[in-house]
Amino acid sequence: MRVLIADDEPLAVERLSRLVTQMGHEVVATAHHGQDVLSHIENASPDVVLLDIQMPGMNGLECAEQLRHLNPRPAIIFCTAYDQHALEAFKFQAQGYLLKPVALQDLEQVFQHLTQLTQAQMTGLQQDELYDVKNQRHQIAAKTYRGVELIPLDSVYYFLADQKYVTVRHKNGSVLIDETLKDLELEFADRFIRIHRNALVSLDYLEGLELVAAGQYQVRLRELDERLSVSRRHLPSLRECMHQL
């Protein structure tokens, strides 16, 4: 992929350039602030912009706001020393949020998620094909030891509440998020169904209902050996939903 690196610290630019090259990608331009990024975009035509947040003049968030209106639009990966901007950064549909010093394996992981969203492919996509009319999130943001990970919603099997956190079980493992199950249920009512006071499951992966004891049921999900308990309260609505699938 063609990569533009934006950071006002020369050593950071040098290190990121080395990592990008090591991964087999091409650094097509470097920039020191947001306006500098915009001036390079047309000629450099990057597929990906590695974007610092704290830069003089136009900062990374302001730059991302401008980049989101481009067509085709480069993927944005924030590389920053600060984690407090993560939620704001994701408003711009960032593909990643990595904390400095950026580790090679973390950068590789984000780039792997971008392989199907190259600039050439993006050219044929319209805004409404990438984001639904409700402007509903297509990704879940989770803070981990790597920084902030983006979990595609269509890879999520279920949400499971445990005290103040919610576990997101997805195709590549599980992460904890600081959101409420109630808010997730309201936001994703068309894609997830509540089966218990502490659990929402994806309608896309819902496969079957199993009787395990008198009046006690569990759901079976595609691709998973795990089973989740269904409460008596939510059993009728679950059955009705499954009849409609």
Image (cartoon, grey):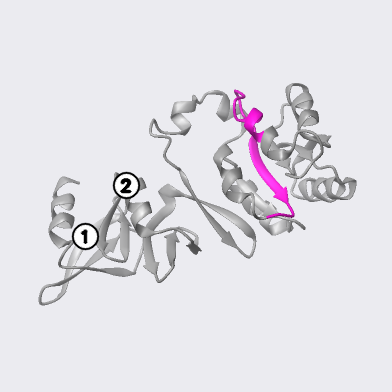
- Is residue 162 shown above or below 156? below
The mark lying in front, picked from 2 and 1, is: 2
Please provide percent x and percent y for residue 230. Answer: 22, 67
Please provide percent x and percent y for residue 43. Answer: 77, 22
Q: Is residue 73 magenta?
A: yes
Classify 10 Å Cα crowding around label 1: few (below 14), some (14-19), many (20 and above): few
Instruction: Write the residue at 82% across / 38% down.
Output: 56
Instruction: Write the residue at 69% across / 58% down.
Output: 105
Q: Which residue is mark 2?
A: 191
- Is residue 52 shown above or below 221? above
**Precedes in sequence: disc 2 or disc 1:** 2
Is residue 85 visible in the rendered image? The answer is yes
Q: Is residue 244 magenta?
A: no
> Viewer-proximal residue, 54 or 227?
54
- Is residue 179 shown above or below 47? below
Q: Is residue 59 left or right of residue 176?
A: right
Q: Is residue 241 left or right of residue 164?
A: left
Task: Give the secondary structure at mark 2.
Answer: loop
Q: CA distance from mark 2 to mark 1?
A: 16 Å
- Is residue 9 shown above or below 147? above
Quarter occupied by residue 53: top right
Q: Return the mark for residue 159.
A: none
Q: Is residue 225 left or right of residue 195?
A: right
The amino acid marked with disc number 2 is Arg
Cβ atoms under marks 2 and 1 closer than 8 Å: no
Quarter occupied by residue 76: top right
> Viewer-proximal residue, 138 or 124?
138
Q: Which residue is mark 1?
A: 208
Residue segment shown in magenta: 64-82
Please provide percent x and percent y for residue 7. Answer: 81, 42
Task: Give the secondary structure at mark 1.
Answer: strand
Instruction: Write the residue at 16% across / 45% down.
Output: 244
